[in-house]
């Protein structure tokens, strides 16, 4: 970004680091803009983290289904067992 959207100065930005994020701050009017330019390495790391999170979510969903099916089968077994004992 060459111009500040607030004061229209040319190339007035300095990088500011806060809470692990990179912001651009105008020297003249103190307008703060999030730095949207990322390096290739940063994109690779964020893509890898996103994939890991998606894989973890899919694993949790599938394990929850297996647990629900197991509990359902146990309840069905106890119902059938109880009915068979009555006769």
Image: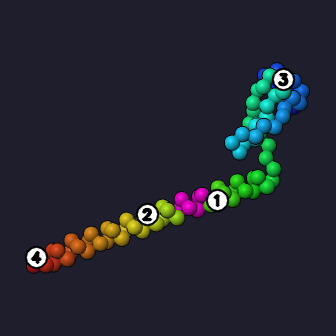
Q: Can you say whether 10 is above or below 56 in the image?
A: above
Estimate the spatial distance between the alpha carbons at disc 3 and disc 2, rounded to whole Å: 55 Å
- The crowding category of the residue bearing disc 4, from other C-alpha atoms within 10 Å (few below 14, some 14 to 19, many at least 20), is few
Circle 3 is placed at which residue position?
Answer: 28
User: Which of the pair 18/9 is nearer the observer?
Assistant: 18
Q: Can you say whether 7 is above or below 73 in the image?
A: above
Circle 4 is placed at which residue position?
Answer: 86
Estimate the spatial distance between the alpha carbons at disc 3 and disc 1, rounded to whole Å: 41 Å
Report the span colored magenta.
53-58
Which callout, 2 or 1, points at the residue further toward the start of the chain? 1
Question: Is residue 33 shown left or right of residue 78?
Answer: right
Estimate the spatial distance between the alpha carbons at disc 1 and disc 4, rounded to whole Å: 53 Å
Question: In what element is the residue under mark 4?
Answer: helix
The image position of residue 86, as x and y in percent, is 10, 76
Q: How is the image coloured?
A: rainbow
Circle 1 is placed at which residue position?
Answer: 51
Location of the N terminus by quadrant is top right
Circle 2 is placed at which residue position?
Answer: 64
- The crowding category of the residue bearing disc 2, from other C-alpha atoms within 10 Å (few below 14, some 14 to 19, many at least 20), is few
Is 31 colored magenta in this rendering? no
Of badges 4 and 3, the one in the foreground is 3
Which residue is pictured at 49% across the width and 62% down the height? 60
Q: Main secondary structure of the magenta part?
A: helix
Which residue is pictured at 70% across the width and 56% down the height? 47
| Residue at far top of view | 7
């Amino acid at each position: 970004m060459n111009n500040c959207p607030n004061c229209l100065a040319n190339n007035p930005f300095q990088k500011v680091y806060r809470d692990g994020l990179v912001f651009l701050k105008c020297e003249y009017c103190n307008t703060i803009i999030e730095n949207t330019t990322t390096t290739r390495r940063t994109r690779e790391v964020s893509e890898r983290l996103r994939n890991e999170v998606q894989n973890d979510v899919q694993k949790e969903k599938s394990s929850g289904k297996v647990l629900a099916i197991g509990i359902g089968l146990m309840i069905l077994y106890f119902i059938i067992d109880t009915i068979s004992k009555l006769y």
